[in-house]
Amino acid sequence: MNWRDHIHSDPDVLLGKPIIKGTRISVELILELYGQGWTEQMILESYPRLTQDSLRAVFNYLSECLRQELYFSFKASA
């Protein structure tokens, strides 16, 4: 899967944050929902314009960002 088929960034939409194409739903929101314990089914029911492929694209996008070292460094706490 090519995440670029599902995700893009437009400076005029959500300040240029990466979003699911055809929506104003950000990659950040999808990750937050998963982090809060939402399931794929819950997300798809709450946001009917999304598809399973668009949700998978979020993780492919994130994976590529990490491979390209587009992340924030932090120190582990004790």
Image (cartoon, grey):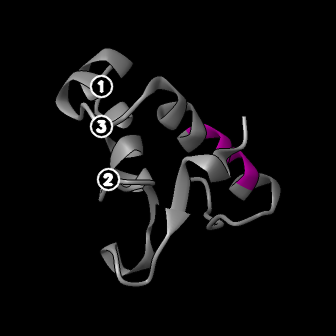
* Closer-to-camera residue (34/15): 15
Q: Is residue 13 magenta?
A: no
Q: Give yes or no for contact between labels 1 and 3 (Cβ–Cβ under 8 Å).
A: no
Residue 9 relative to residue 1: left or right: left
Distance (Cα) linking label 3 and label 2: 10 Å
In magenta stretch: residue 63:
yes
- Chain part drawn in magenta: 59-64
Does 14 appear above or below 39?
below
Q: Quadrant of residue 19?
A: bottom left
The residue positioned 47% from the left and 24% from the top of the image is 52
Label at residue 25: 2
Three-letter code for the amino acid on which mark 3 is drawn: Arg
Residue 26: image quadrant is bottom left
Q: Are marks 3 and 2 in contact (CB under 8 Å)?
A: yes
Task: Answer few, some or many: residues within 10 Å of disc 2's Cα (few below 14, many 20 plus, some between 14 and 19).
Answer: some
Type of secondary structure dominating the magenta stretch: helix
Q: Secondary structure at mark 2?
A: loop
The label nearer to you, 3 versus 2, is 3
Residue shown at 46%/76% (left/top)?
10
Q: Which residue is mark 3?
A: 49
Residue 54: percent from left, percent from top: 49, 37
Q: Is residue 24 above or below residue 51?
A: below
Number of numbered tags placed on the structure image: 3
Task: Give the spatial CA distance, label 1 vs label 3.
Answer: 8 Å
Rendered image: mark on residue 34: none
| 1 or 3: tag closer to the N-terminus | 1
Alpha carbons under labels 1 and 2: distance apart: 12 Å
Which label sits in the foreground, 1 or 3? 3
Please report the residue visible at 33 percent of the width from the left and 50 percent of the height from the top: 29
Amino acid at circle 2 = Ile
| x, y percent for residue 51 | 42, 29
- The residue where tag 1 is placed is 44
